[in-house]
Image (cartoon, rainbow, N blue to C red):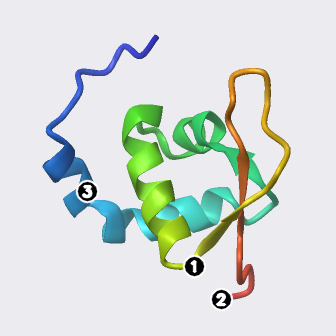
Amino acid sequence: MSTHALRDPREVIREEMSMHAAIRTALADGPLRVPQIAEAIGHPAEEVVYWVMGMRRYGHLVELPDDDDEGWFPYALTNPGA
C-alpha cells in the first residue's frame, strides 16, 4: 500500500511530458515494471502508471508479455538510443 497522498489525476497527467526523460533513464538498462520505475524515479506507482500508459500509447514504450504474480508487466523502450 502506498504512503503517498493521491493527487488529482488531471495534475498527474499534466506532468506526463516532463516525466518522459526520467522514465527513459530508468529504463535505459533494460525493462522494468511500474513499481520498479516508480522506485527509480521517486514517484508513487499510482502516478507512474498514468505516465507509462501514455508513453505506451504513443509508441515510446512496449509492454512485454512476462507479467509477475501481481499482474505487473515489464516495459521497455522502443528506441533505446534516442
Three-letter amino acid code at the position of disc 3: Ile
Element type at marker 3? helix
Three-letter amino acid code at the position of disc 1: Gly
At x 34%, y 71%, the residue is 17
Q: Position of residue 60 (x, y in %)?
A: 58, 76
Element type at marker 2? loop
Quadrant of the image occupied by residue 27: bottom right
Q: Residues within 10 Å of mark 1 (few under 14, many from 20)?
A: few
Residue 78 horizontal side relative to residue 38, left or right: right
Q: Residues within 10 Å of mark 2 (few under 14, many from 20)?
A: few
**What distance separates the C-alpha of mark 2 from that of mark 1?**
13 Å
Q: Position of residue 64 (x, y in %)?
A: 79, 56
Q: Residues within 10 Å of mark 3 (few under 14, many from 20)?
A: some
Relative depth, front residue between 20 and 33:
33
**What distance separates the C-alpha of mark 3 from that of mark 1?**
17 Å
Q: Which residue is mark 2?
A: 82
Q: Which mark is residue 13?
A: 3
Element type at marker 1? loop
* Nearer the camera: disc 2 or disc 1: 1
The mark that comes first in sequence, 2 or 1, is 1
Q: Which mark is residue 59?
A: 1
Q: Is residue 57 depicted above or below 30 in this figure?
A: below
At x 74%, y 79%, the residue is 80
